[in-house]
Image: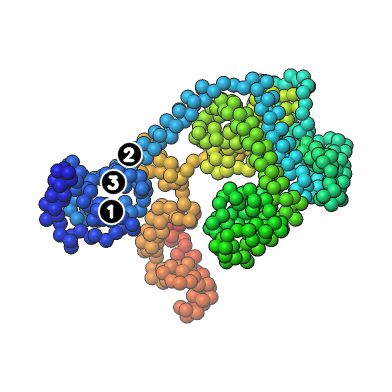
Amino acid sequence: MLDDRRKKEEVRTMSVYYSKEQINQDAIAGIDYKDLVDELRLRPEPEDLISIQDILDLFNGEIAIDDPRIDDLLSRLATDGFAISEPDDEIEAHLRKAEASIRDNVHIYMRELSKLDLLSRDEELALARARNHGMSEVLTALATIRPVVEHARTLFESHFDSGRLDRYVAGYLDVVDELPKVNVIASNAPRDTKGKPPNLDQAHARFKRFTKAMDAFYIQPKHRRTVNASKELETAFGYFKFTMPHYLDFVQMFRAKMAPLESARSKLRKIVRTAGITSSVYANEFEPNITGRRWLTLVAAQPKRTREALGRHANKISELRSQVRAVEKELGHSTEELLEIKRRVKKGESRVNAATEGLAVGNLRLVMSIAQKFKNRGVEEEDLIQEGNVGLIRAIEKFDYTRGFKFSTYATWWIRQAVTRALGEYGRTVRLPANVNQDMKKVYRAQRQLTQELLREPTPDEIGARIEKTAKQVRDVFNYTRELRGLDTPIGDDDDGTTFGNMIADENVRSPEDEAVDASRPSVIARALAVLDAREQMVMAMNFGINRADSMTFTQIAEELHVSRERVRQIHMSALKKLRLSPMSKSLEPYLR
């Protein structure tokens, strides 16, 4: 208490030095300037310099160092007599601290990765099977949602007719216990990365089974559909391994269809609860009968006060119940059935996500080892790691364990491809298209191979023959790899501000030499013409346009001087002869070039 009283006394004492006119008490974009000044005066050493960090500490992280209000505060504090430290030094210190923090984060990340164990072959298979099983659970749950399966059927027909079935179906989710024995090293992986397209005969047979089960299920009224028909449709649809974009599209479609139902249920729950009906009564009695006639019976059985409260919202309740009925009709299930399907979808997605995370975490060390091979090529190491992680996720989505390959072998190429693409896109000042980067890799690979075979540097024709390119295309690739230099690159060791751009000639500006020659031309010509008499000087000046707007012909000069054209020619020839013999003739040579 005494400390607080003493602090308040200090504030009152120091306020003597600052009148209300000196301190603007208005808020600066949400900041109370008066309170800020009081807080600064309560520092242990009020006379010390006020730094940006002091202000940041007072706001407990509510404003950042790049907040534009910082400059306004510093300016106003300086005007009011406070001593302010140099802000540029502080900002630079903060930037250095941030850079150090980034480096520390990378080191921490690498240290944590070293604690992770690599996945064994059995663990990879277990996770891959779990992921497929989760996807199958999701598709099995969605198999009786009519808009979803009709959309799937339309897509299958369009992709099958266009011959691009591999863009729609990546394989099948059948459980395979015995895997083929393969022995493939990582260098062979690129040939298998895209995988083989689905067997068309097998795909057509499975699709035929799916459409047959779908027709048999939906041709019957809902109350006459059998359990066997439902299971057959779920089995036929649940074992297609759709590509990830289409798989996610099916899930998103179901969620979008369910959104109006869930919104209506939530609003109905709020209305009923405000009327005085408990949550347990609503959940056990009202909610199972949202679309049925029993709803009205339940409302009629409520106390008068509750009935009146519900009656005030009768139109809204009727609208929401109709909204629920519309969703049930479109999806072909009751609300309880749809909620159960949603629960099954969520369970399957959780299994897919858990298996994906397991495969990803178990191979993060693989990403790190590949990314480190491409360090110091113009892209930060942490960015390479992130791009490698994207490639790892892509590999997980496309991996088919039934082909017998080890996942790490399969993922290596996807990770390397993601990292090299990042280098091609971000590692150069001028970004080259992806196909040009691929051509560069082919050219340099062929160049290395031919150098080893021929024991000399191969010619562009020899390289082109190896990779089926023309010599011109090979030379173009070599030109793409020329080192780029920024115009702001410093030149020399002296810190005089000279940049590479200062050393490049500007073709639109005349050189100083030409400017000097042009500036001296009138005086040089005047001295050269001084050896001629007055008439010769006049004829030469008129003929060559010296000190005149235009040059004149002999005929025009003759008319001007009232002499014959022949006389003008004679004067001109005499003047040229004198100039050739004059010592000043050499001074005119620069103007002849």
Choose mark 2 or mark 3, whichever is in front: 3
The residue carrying mark 1 is 73
Q: Residues within 10 Å of mark 3 (few under 14, many from 20)?
A: few
Choose mark 3 or mark 1, whichever is in front: 3
Q: CA distance from mark 1 to mark 2?
A: 20 Å
On residue 93, the disc is 2
**Is the residue under label 1 in contact with that under label 3 (CB below 8 Å)?**
no
The residue carrying mark 3 is 58
Q: CA distance from mark 3 to mark 1?
A: 13 Å
Instruction: Specify which label sits upstream in the sequence, 1 or 2.
Output: 1
Residue at the (58%, 28%) spot, across then down: 361
**Is the residue under label 3 in contact with that under label 2 (CB below 8 Å)?**
no
Residue type at tag 2: Ala
Asked which secondary structure carries label 2, the reply is: helix
Nearer the observer, 156 or 464: 156
Residue 176 image point, x, y percent: 77, 26
